[in-house]
Image: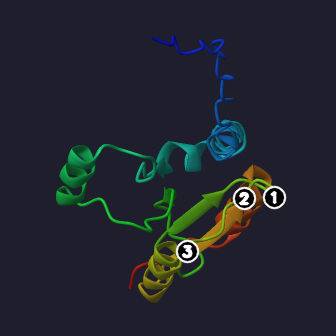
Amino acid sequence: MTVPALRPFKAKAARAKPVDREGQEQAALMKELQLRYPEAYKLIYHVPNGGHRIKAVAAKLKGQGVKAGVPDLVLPMARGGYFGLYIEFKAKPPFDAPVSASQDAFLQMLTSQNYLAIVCRGNIDAIEAIRAYLLQPATVAA
């Protein structure tokens, strides 16, 4: 009877944890807003639609109204004839991801409803867009 040759054990190399650059940059944006535009910081909020979830949780959230393509940030301050600002936030290049078809479609639907719906790449782009938005006169309801 032949005994099979034993192969030496090779430990698998540890896979580096992915870096959430988009999350880091969005957190930096929130800190900057808190310092520079506290009135906007009090109202802006993040819509946590993304991320990977197990199927049961994803189905439950979908039943509760989670929709693909909803922008990351909402600023419910009416300015410049718009009812509010929606931002699809991406990390700055070269770490940015493309805008998906569902994100683009949702931005277009929001625009058709008189919201300013934009894509910002990085916290500097976003703070500049928010600054420009806040400089516009308040929208007055007729």
Pointer 2: what residue? 96
Task: Decide if residue 40 is on the left or right side of residue 60.
Answer: right
Distance from the alpha carbon under mark 2 to that under mark 1:
5 Å
- Total numbered circles: 3
112 w.r.t. 139: above or below:
below
Pointer 3: what residue? 117
120 w.r.t. 27: above or below:
below
15 w.r.t. 70: above or below:
above
What residue type is disc 2 on? Answer: Asp
Q: Residues within 10 Å of mark 1 (few under 14, many from 20)?
A: few
What residue type is disc 3 on? Answer: Ala
Q: Position of residue 131 (x, y in %)?
A: 72, 60
Disc 3 versus disc 2: nearer the observer: 2
Distance from the alpha carbon under mark 1 to that under mark 3:
20 Å
What residue type is disc 1 on? Answer: Pro
Pointer 1: what residue? 93
Q: Position of residue 1 (x, y in %)?
A: 45, 11
Residue at 24% x, 58% y is 62
Q: Secondary structure at mark 3?
A: strand
Answer yes or no: do the residues labelled 3 and 2 have beta carbons within 8 Å? no
Residue at 24% x, 44% y is 57
Answer yes or no: do the residues labelled 2 and 1 have beta carbons within 8 Å? yes
Distance from the alpha carbon under mark 3 to that under mark 2:
18 Å
Task: Decide if residue 113 is on the left or right side of residue 9.
Answer: left
Q: Residue furthest right?
A: 94
Q: Secondary structure at mark 1?
A: loop
Q: Position of residue 125 (x, y in %)?
A: 77, 60
Q: Quadrant of residue 110?
A: bottom left
Whichever of callouts 1 and 3 sits on the residue coming sooner in the sequence is 1
Task: Depth check: give the residue in front, 81 or 107.
Answer: 107
Task: Depth check: give the residue in front, 37 or 96.
Answer: 96
Q: Position of residue 29 (x, y in %)?
A: 68, 44
